Image (cartoon, coloured by chain):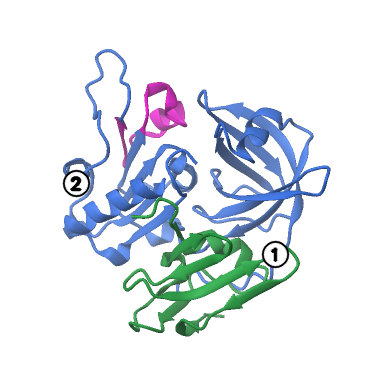
Chain colours: A green, B blue
Amino acid sequence: MDELMLDGNAVAGMLSEVFAVEITTAAMTCGNCGTSGAVGAMHVFRGAGIVMRCPDCGHAVAKIVDDGTRMWLNFGGMQALEVTR
Amino acid sequence: MEGTTVLGRLTWQPADVTGVVAETPRAKTIAFDVPGWAGHRAGQHLDVRLTADDGYQAERSYSIASAPDGTRVELTVVRIADGEVSPYLTDDLQPGDQIELRGPVGGYFVWEPPLGGPLLLVAGGSGIAPLMAMIRLRAAAGSDVDTRLLLSSRGWDDIIYREELERLNGHGLTVTHTLTMSQPPGWAGYARRVDAEMLAEVAPGPAERPLVYICGPTPFVEAAAQALVGLGYRPEAIKTERFGPTGS
């Protein structure tokens, strides 16, 4: 187990600057195993950037880098992000 | 999905410190008035940003400990000796000071009275903060939903909100402490880390389908969540808020 692991909740503040809807209750579908779960339940690892991993298979579903001026979001590891208006 | 609301995008906003109260030798509660605060839900958190004179900025997330109450927001911060943000918040901040906040954020780790119960709340150290917001909201709303709180602290003097929890105990709320490192003379309660046996004794049974909220250091949350799944609780009803390594 990685002691530095956090939950999807941990990136809610950062993502709230981009998304106009509450994002931790949005459903993210993993691009590897197809499991769907709340963004708040994803596993989050912080390093030079942020990696969000599927709690079921560990696949990197999203990567985020924020340099203070620009935010770079790679959602290539997910099949879908479902938000409710 | 329940609880999803259109918020609009969030930005940093100024917050005025209105009070600082020592909770334990290492933890303080800081009260803020946030002009224009849109209100929060029990369990949500916010981000704090500090800016040094040279422009260097540091951000940290803290759970909101107070129940929704207008533009007032309370955070409980544990001082980390070599921390970058917490020593400033606990040692230097005074009423009248101003810092920047962004929030509230997170609709996932949230409880409100219409969600009902029974509730199982499991906290390690300052992980009690968002669960305290739920307990305070529950009390303010006059709810008597069956609520079991299992709070793990290092010692008696390290129990955050100890006296308030004693006052609120009853009316369907059962508070159980475990003291992992030191115990006062005559202590008859738990004196070890949270484990499956302890959870089985404290929690409503799996057949009662409790809503479970666990908050604390990552190893604490992992151990508690895995033990509960092993005891037969529904993984989808277990919500977690991890705040990193022990002591951070």
Mark 1 element type: loop
Where does residue A76 sit, x and y in percent of width and height?
51, 83
User: Which chain is home to disc 1?
Assistant: A
Q: Is residue B235 above or below residue A76?
A: above
Mark 2 element type: helix
Q: Amino acid at mark 1?
A: Asp
Give the residue at x 52% y 72%: B4
User: How many neighbours does mark 2 have within 10 angstroms: few (below 14), some (14-19), or many (20 or more)?
Assistant: some
Residue where numbered disc 1 is placed: A67
Front residue (pair B204, B123)? B123
Q: Is residue A18 above or below residue B151?
A: below
Give the residue at x 56% y 47%: B64
Front residue (pair B204, A32)? A32
Give the residue at x 63% y 31%: B90
Is any atom of residue B206 visible in this view?
yes
- Segment colored magenta: B153-178
Residue with the most extreme bottom position: A79
Where does residue B102 sit, x and y in percent of width and height?
68, 56
Q: Residue B170 in magenta?
A: yes
Where does residue B80 sit, x and y in percent of width and height?
54, 34
